[in-house]
Amino acid sequence: MSLFQITVSELAERFGLVCHGDGSHVVDGVGTLAGAGPSQLSFLSNSKYASQLASTRAGVVVMREENVAESPVLALVARDPYVAYAKIAALFERLPASPQGIHPTAVVAPTARVAPTASIGPGCVIEDGAVVEDGAILGPHCIVGPECTVGAQCRLVARVTLVIRVTLGQRVLVHPGAVIGSDGFGLAFDRDHWIKLPQLGGVRIGDDCEIGANTTIDRGALDDTVLEEDVRLDNQIQIAHNVYIGAHTALAGCAAVAGSAKIGRYCMIGGNAGVLGHLELADRVTITAKSLVTHSIREPGEYSSGVPLQENRLWRRNAARFKHLDEYVRRLSALEKDSNNE
Amino acid sequence: MSLFQITVSELAERFGLVCHGDGSHVVDGVGTLAGAGPSQLSFLSNSKYASQLASTRAGVVVMREENVAESPVLALVARDPYVAYAKIAALFERLPASPQGIHPTAVVAPTARVAPTASIGPGCVIEDGAVVEDGAILGPHCIVGPECTVGAQCRLVARVTLVIRVTLGQRVLVHPGAVIGSDGFGLAFDRDHWIKLPQLGGVRIGDDCEIGANTTIDRGALDDTVLEEDVRLDNQIQIAHNVYIGAHTALAGCAAVAGSAKIGRYCMIGGNAGVLGHLELADRVTITAKSLVTHSIREPGEYSSGVPLQENRLWRRNAARFKHLDEYVRRLSALEKDSNNE
Amino acid sequence: MSLFQITVSELAERFGLVCHGDGSHVVDGVGTLAGAGPSQLSFLSNSKYASQLASTRAGVVVMREENVAESPVLALVARDPYVAYAKIAALFERLPASPQGIHPTAVVAPTARVAPTASIGPGCVIEDGAVVEDGAILGPHCIVGPECTVGAQCRLVARVTLVIRVTLGQRVLVHPGAVIGSDGFGLAFDRDHWIKLPQLGGVRIGDDCEIGANTTIDRGALDDTVLEEDVRLDNQIQIAHNVYIGAHTALAGCAAVAGSAKIGRYCMIGGNAGVLGHLELADRVTITAKSLVTHSIREPGEYSSGVPLQENRLWRRNAARFKHLDEYVRRLSALEKDSNNE
């Protein structure tokens, strides 16, 4: 598969790992403990998979010191095997070639500025006043709207739309179908119909952010919608206008954040979780999957809502009771009162 | 920023507002109470922000009569400051230029009909029998499929797909990534595999509707999927086949409506709320965020489902109890019976 | 409308149905019981609609034996009228013409291989090493990335993106905006920032699958993400990396499956339902709409979570009580103990 080869010793040196065994062994790829062959490297991070170590055919396994004794194969010891593996695996990734320059089918406005080292793919449209900086790669069919900036070394994989007044920092990675800078959902109700509020702000995305496939990030009504650096958004996430997300926060697939909410740094928002508008979340808040945040959160920690999955027949009975929970509690209190009076 | 300038007196006259102070003051933009400068207009609608009025540097603020006395700056009095602000702010919006005519990279079928005053952007594809009416603007990469009509003054911002048999009324605004007229999810189970039901209907969208980024609206199986006029859909909404949505209803981001549901006029459906198939909702029904509508609603009002967010440690205990709620209620009833028998 | 005409006798013969009445009657389309006219065929499957039979103007109705006596019109008797109708209706579907060959505005890499019988629409981009097999139809603006294969007779309606290492079997139908093969959301936390795990696997989609509009299916981290044959995904579904979905399973709109979950065959996942990562679902499991699957399911059956919708005023009271449910149960147990001790 991969044309890249490296010895285990070189890996140890490059990433500060300790090698137990023959460091001259050559690897040319990575794989799972169950699937890797003798020329491939694997890793053991989650102790749940420790039993797979005994039978692995991998050439070398990145692991913690404590697992070395049981390893039947060459071991590379890391404090955090998952992080070490991530760095090593990146060596074996082959990205499609992206030739510098502008594809002949792309349409670039005369007032746009594209760095000569950037790669603009087939069918891209770069509009008035847009800027694409050094080494940025735009795959097929990307649209960079008016007054948008794509920072150095960004990669817009394919079919990304930056609508208007969007600024991407450096090394931002955006996946296909993402729409950044679309109109915020701002409406005023005028007696019997809706009036649209013009969305005059923009979007600012910090360095090293990642934006998932078909994710949408609306531009601000007056001020900007902001993602600080290293924010990681999975697929199909919805970020409404004037949301502010602190650095290093990650949102899992299908999460949604309503208008003007402010999320702290190092937060983790689970899949399909929601945050209502205008709320504030402190740093290091974790929200579990499908929970709805209905009030601001001042303390770090893990928060949840929802009820557990059950067989439908049982669930129906419990759910029906929920509709009268307040009444039951009143009846309980009445009984307690009776009991105390006896 | 903006090149448009106007005096406060002219604004008062144009929008029927009362000016308190020097009407000859000129404004050239809008901003928040906290951010606007002396040449900008701001507004005070939500009394929550009244404290910001004292320190605003805005040139003029749109407000209610009751706030004029405390205003340190020029005041424009409106019955509904938010509506008045929306109308004023629209004056300062600068939309990208959209030259009339068909971009040379667009592909237009010979049987399609495009009004000479329409603007067809780079890479657009207009298919057989499609119609684009007067003054409609199609940004880059829009696809107008067979038998689709884009009404006068519509704006398809970019990368909008109208699949087949879709009719947009006048002034419909559609954001990037929206897919309208895709196959409804109609399947019949034939012993051991699925058979697809052809989706032979279309989609009809009324005047002044707005369709958010990456929203999907499927076409009907036999009859059409219908949105009446002034329906407002935020991003990533899913409207299944044969849904019918009444005029002036608004759905927030990530809401979903299952097949053949009928939603009334002036409804408000919260973010990530869901409506099951074949249900009917009366006019003026509000559904709060993330609620699931499992039965038809005959009366206007606000409806909800879900449980509150809590610290995970506490939530776990309560959620575990939910699985036996029916049993607890039976035990409560038994105690009450005992108590009454004593 | 349709140019296709057929007699009722021919339909009976072709699909093994029994005709009650004049088989020489000609039909040229299909419609609902309420809407079909004398030249159209309709069906009665759900007994809920049986009352509409008396007043139908349809030329012929597909129904069960038991309904023939009450039918005022020609009847075609089927064991499963819905399945029979699905097969008949397909005869009347007119798909847009898709000329064989490559549209002049498409961009095809020299190392890509496109079958001469395939149809490649305007603006398509076929990248290095991609393969498009016999009779496949790619509508406008599809992107087939490096090392992707589109099987024979597939149809990519429009604006479909296959990112990298995606293999579609035969007759796969993919709707606009779908993104298949994007990066899985794999991150390792390195002290104070995120490191991305390269996503080195691919996606394999079996024969006869259907993928809805704006649905996303990520490629695997090491192994592939897999959909077996005849899997049916509605719109806006999110399938994370290394998910495995068994044959004939259907997911309704906005459902989401987290990384490495394994779903059995013949499962039904309701709208906006979620499955957490690394879980396993047995064959023939049904999950109702908006439920969250938080543990593996070993037995076939129907499973649910959530609480019922109520008027907001009532719901608030019950929801507030949920926060103390554990305490109430403890108080109930204490009362029971007291009661037993008396």
Image (spheres, coloured by chain):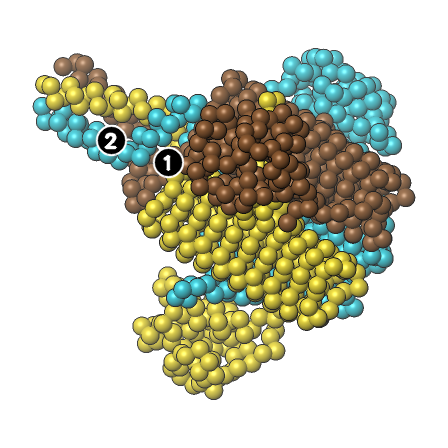
Chain colours: A yellow, B brown, C cyan
Disc 1, SS: loop
Residue depicted at 43% across the width and 85% down the height? A22
Which numbered disc covers residue C139?
A: none
Which tag is nearer the camera, tag 2 or tag 1? 1
Q: CA distance from mark 2 to mark 1?
A: 17 Å
Instruction: Check disc 2 and report its element: helix, strand or loop.
Output: helix
Whether residue C267 is situated above or below residue C41 in the rendered picture: below
Give the chain letter at badge 2. C
Can residue B71 be seen from the camera position used here? yes
- Image quarter where the C terminus of chain B lies is top left
Give the residue pinned by disc 2. C328
Whole-percent x, y for residue A67 in the image: 34, 72
Taking the spot 50% from the left edge, 25% from the top edge, the residue there is B65
Which of the two residues, C62 or A75, is positioned nearer the viewer here? Answer: A75
Pointer 2 local density, CA inside 10 Å: few below 14, some 14–19, many at least 20: many
CB under 8 Å between callouts 2 and 1? no
x, y percent for residue A23: 44, 85
Nearer to the camera, B20 or A194 = B20
Q: Please report the residue visible at 64 percent of the width from the left and 49 percent of the height from the top.
A: B1
Considering every residue shown, the one lying at the far right of the view is: B110
In the rendered structure, the answer to whether residue C134 lies left or right of residue C182 reads right
> Disc 1 residue type?
Pro
Report which residue position mark 1 lands on.
B308
Is residue A70 in view?
no
What residue is drawn where x is 51% and y is 75%?
A40
Count of all numbered marks drawn on residues in the image: 2
Amino acid beneath label 2: Tyr
Q: Is residue A67 left or right of residue C296?
A: left
Closer to us: A266 or B66:
B66
Q: From what the image shows, is residue B328 above or below residue A182?
A: above
Number of residues whose C-alpha sits closer than 10 Å to that of mark 1, classed few (under 14), some (14–19) or many (20 or more): many
